[in-house]
Every structure is written in C-alpha cells, then in structure tokens.
Amino acid sequence: MHYAWRVLLFSLISSVATSANVAVFKYDGSRQCERDSGTSLEAMQKRELKGIKVIKSSKQPDGNMRASVCGGKTGLMNVYEISEKDLNKAEKRGFKKLPPP
C-alpha cells in the first residue's frame, strides 16, 4: 500500500480510536463492473467478527493503482475499529491490523 494512503487511512481511523483500540481490515472481494459484488460491512461483521465488539466500521480503498478492467479487483477494504484485546482473535480470522503511518 502506498505510504500516503496508509497515512490517510490511519488518520481517518485513529481520529476516533483510543489507545486501547486498533483498526483491522479485510478486503471485501468486490470486482470492477460487477454491481453489488463484494461483502458488505454488516455481513462481514456478522459472519466473521462474531463475538468481537466493533466500535466503528468503514469501507476504504487500499490506495493501490489497478488496471481498469471488468472483473478486476477494486481494492476496497472493510475496516473495523475493535478493542486491542480482540486483535489476536481478529487476526486468526484473517483480518490484518491497519499499519501505522
């Protein structure tokens, strides 16, 4: 991920995060030219973060350049702010911690 995008994403998430919270993300799987493709924030939270309290969620681009081609990945991520104590659980479910700037 480009550094500038990381800084922007982290600043957006950390503006409401406390020191006891972290931002985690997982790609939503959406594809270019495929309307309604990908997993919604709500569906991913319900299915994959069950038992983990989500403080805030948002859909964010990863900042990487991609070829414009139907069927290509969009690079959209579902980002969730969770308690730092739940980070290990989220990582075991395939989520990654949003890197600091």
Image: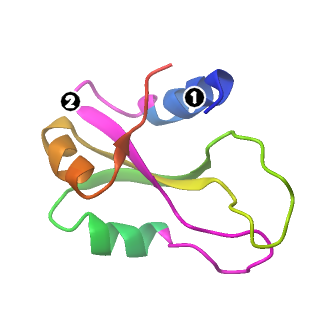
Q: Which of 97 and 45 is in front in this view?
A: 97
The first of marks 2 and 1 along the sequence is 1
Q: Which residue is drawn at 59% across and 49% down?
A: 60
Measuring from the top left, give residue 4's x and y in whole percent.
67, 23
Q: From the viewer's perspective, is 80 left or right of 52?
A: right
Comparing labels 2 and 1, the label whose residue is closer to the camera:
1
Q: Which residue is drawn at 56% across and 67% down?
A: 29
Per the image, label 1 sits on a secondary structure element best described as helix
Measuring from the top left, give residue 93's x and y in whole percent.
25, 58
Per the image, label 2 sits on a secondary structure element best described as loop
User: What's the magenta bit mostly, secondary-structure-wise?
Assistant: loop
Identified by mark 2, the residue type is Ala
Measuring from the top left, give residue 25's x and y in whole percent.
42, 49
Q: From the viewer's perspective, is 37 left or right of 58?
A: right
Measuring from the top left, give residue 47's x and y in whole percent.
30, 75
| Residue 20, disc | 2
Q: Which residue is drawn at 21% across and 42% down?
A: 87
Q: Is residue 79 above or below residue 43?
A: above
| Separation of marks 2 and 1 at Cα, in angstroms | 20 Å
Q: Which colour scheme is used?
A: rainbow
Q: Please name the residue that numbered disc 1 is placed on.
A: 6
Q: Is residue 23 above or below residue 40?
A: above
Q: Quadrant of residue 99?
A: top left
Q: Does the magenta stretch include residue 65?
A: no
Identified by mark 1, the residue type is Arg
Q: Is the residue under label 1 in contact with that under label 2 (CB below 8 Å)?
A: no
Magenta part of the chain: 14-40
| Residue 72, disc | none
Q: How crowded is mark 1: few (under 14 residues within 10 Å), some or many (20 or more)?
A: some
